Image: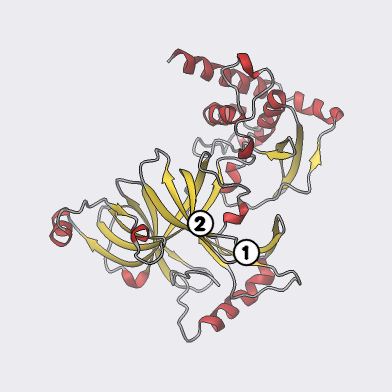
């Protein structure tokens, strides 16, 4: 059963908890469920609302217990994190609490991660992306720094304290978040009709997405200072698919500045632009989602530098290209789907034959432009 079910947007009381779940999921399971496999595990994945997703384990006999699920509120903001380390895991082995570090490895925090089973390998040496949703258990609102200080003394008004790491019995993913309200949205859960607030809180540590029941909010405005005790959950993913090959050298890497797959990915995040995107995607291309429309030129570049094969799948009616190297799928452009919360699987797929590959060679100007931008970035990096 879920380790923690926030009331945010749902309001399940103790007396009708199981009945409420059955009523909610009874319709959703048939309406929007999608079966997904990871290794030897199967799950039913559904959206209960555009911001909320649920994962239901499927037993070996194909049955589903609606009271056994994991939930995540999508924030649509991915944060760079590193050094994941398990604090504790579920009995089921599909998730647990991770201690993660900010990208500069200065500050740790505990996060409950229901979807850890989706990540093939968690290693401290790799970089990861994480969505963090903070469910407010209590919240106090202050209109000025003086008002905050009168209650908390010398505590910084933008402090982040990972309370769960200091628990006397076992660690949890609770935190004390103090900060300034940077953005604010009042939302309605389309399934239940309940209202809640989605706040973006500016702290010295990071910006945090905080979800708050309407009943905890009297009067709040952008610029207010808040003190929140929150339960932190997250979705984690590698920076790209195939990160286990991050240190794989390209062909002829000995005399090259750009040696590894990871080197290529980091350069590509700066090299992708509107003009290298697929023509149909150029109008909507945005620098905040740089991998959008870049899968064909990127797959071709990866193939050119690292070999392997090129594959494609259809995602919502559009073709998406990626690579397979040393029996590992490599997709340097999957971030677009994560940013937009679009689930997809790499199998089944179609592999390109030599005859088909000529069509990818015909990418022409976009492919040449991407190579030029990568080369120019490497030259600038070498000069600094």
The residue that disc 2 covers is 74
> Can you say whether 30 is above or below 325 in the image?
below
The answer, for residue 323, to whether it is visible in the render is: yes
Q: Residue at x 50, y 56 (%)?
A: 74
| The image quarter in which residue 11 lies | bottom left
* Depth order, front residue of 54/109: 109
Q: Position of residue 253 (x, y in %)?
A: 64, 19
How many angstroms separate mark 1 from mark 2 (CA)? 13 Å
The residue that disc 1 covers is 46
Q: Residue at x 45, y 72 (%)?
A: 194
> Can you say whether 61 is above or below 201 in the image?
below
The N terminus - image quarter: bottom right
SS for dot 1: strand
The answer, for residue 272, to whether it is visible in the render is: no
Q: Residue at x 39, y 38 (%)?
A: 104
Q: Position of residue 140 (x, y in %)?
A: 26, 65
The C terminus - image quarter: top left
Q: Residue at x 59, y 72 (%)?
A: 68
């Amino acid at each position: 059963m879920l380790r923690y079910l926030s009331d945010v947007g749902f309001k399940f009381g103790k007396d009708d908890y199981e009945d409420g779940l059955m009523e909610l999921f009874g319709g959703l399971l048939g309406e929007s469920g999608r079966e997904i496999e990871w290794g030897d595990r199967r799950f039913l994945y559904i959206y209960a609302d555009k911001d909320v997703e649920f994962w239901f384990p499927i037993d070996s006999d194909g049955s589903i217990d609606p009271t056994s699920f994991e939930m995540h509120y999508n924030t649509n903001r991915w944060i760079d994190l590193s050094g994941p380390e398990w604090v504790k895991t579920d009995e089921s082995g599909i998730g647990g609490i991770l201690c993660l570090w900010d990208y500069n490895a200065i500050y740790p925090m505990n996060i409950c991660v229901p979807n850890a089973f989706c990540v093939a390998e968690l290693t401290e040496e790799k970089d990861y992306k994480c969505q963090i949703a903070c469910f407010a258990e209590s919240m106090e609102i202050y209109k000025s720094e003086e008002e905050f200080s009168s209650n908390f003394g010398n505590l910084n008004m933008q402090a982040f304290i990972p309370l769960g790491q200091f628990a006397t019995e076992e660690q949890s993913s609770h935190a004390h978040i103090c900060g300034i309200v940077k953005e604010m949205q009042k939302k309605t859960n389309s399934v239940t009709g309940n209202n809640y607030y989605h706040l973006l809180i500016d702290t010295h540590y990071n910006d945090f997405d905080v979800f708050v029941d309407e009943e905890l909010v009297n009067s709040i405005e952008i610029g207010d200072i808040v003190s929140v005790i929150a339960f932190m959950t997250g979705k984690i993913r590698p920076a790209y698919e195939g990160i286990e090959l991050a240190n794989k050298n390209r062909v002829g890497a000995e005399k090259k500045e750009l040696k590894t797959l990871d080197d290529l990915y980091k350069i590509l995040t700066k090299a992708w632009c509107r003009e290298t995107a697929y023509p149909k995607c150029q109008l909507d291309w945005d620098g905040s989602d740089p991998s959008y429309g870049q899968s064909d030129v990127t797959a071709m570049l990866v193939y050119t530098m690292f070999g392997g094969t090129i594959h494609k799948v259809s995602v919502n009616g559009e073709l998406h290209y990626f690579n397979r190297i040393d029996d590992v799928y490599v997709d340097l452009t999957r971030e677009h789907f994560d940013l937009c919360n679009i689930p997809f699987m790499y199998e089944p797929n179609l592999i390109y034959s030599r005859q088909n590959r000529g069509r990818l060679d015909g990418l022409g100007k976009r492919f040449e432009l991407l190579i030029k931008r990568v080369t120019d970035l490497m030259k600038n990096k070498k000069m600094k």
